[in-house]
Image (cartoon, rainbow, N blue to C red):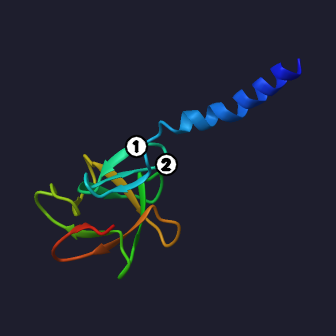
Amino acid sequence: MKKLLILALFAFIALPMLAQTGNKKTGINKENCTFTNKEGKTFNLYGKVKIVEHFPDIKVQIVDSFEDLDVKIVEHFPDQCGKVKLVENFTDVKVQIVNSFPDFKVKIVDSFPSVKK
């Protein structure tokens, strides 16, 4: 009975840890120019972006220094890393601008958008 109780306790503790090892790594992937959130969803760091107040895919903080991503706002062809077009419909990602606890920090630039990390 004691061995069965120890085995059950081990299974109760170890199985959730084993299940988490298959999760994708969260954060920015510099090689693919993507961001993976805590739920495991991956988003491109370029494309059509809608700024929202509630229920975002990504939370960002706009800063002047120590940014994770340089972003250039464009009107056409947001198809390279860091280039975004602000839209209201047919979005690729919904972004909320916050002052604290962002997923990552961005700096708005006029040229050379890229991932910094």
Instruction: Tell me where residue 12 appears, x and y as whole percent.
Output: 72, 30
Q: What is the x, y in percent for residue 82?
A: 23, 63
Q: Secondary structure at mark 2?
A: loop
Secondary structure category for the residue under label 1: loop
The residue wearing badge 1 is 41
- Which residue occupies the extreme left position in the image? 76
Q: CA distance from mark 2 to mark 1?
A: 7 Å
Q: Residue pushed farthest bottom?
A: 64
Which one is nearer the viewer's eye here, 9 or 113? 9
Rendered image quadrant of residue 110: bottom left
The residue located at (47%, 36%) in the rendering is: 22
Question: Please, which residue is most extreme toward the front here?
Answer: 3
Q: Where residue 58 sits: x, y (%)?
A: 41, 56
Residue visible at 43% across and 43% down?
24
Q: Is residue 84 above or below residue 26?
A: below
Above or below for 105 versus 90: below
Residue 95: image quadrant is: bottom left
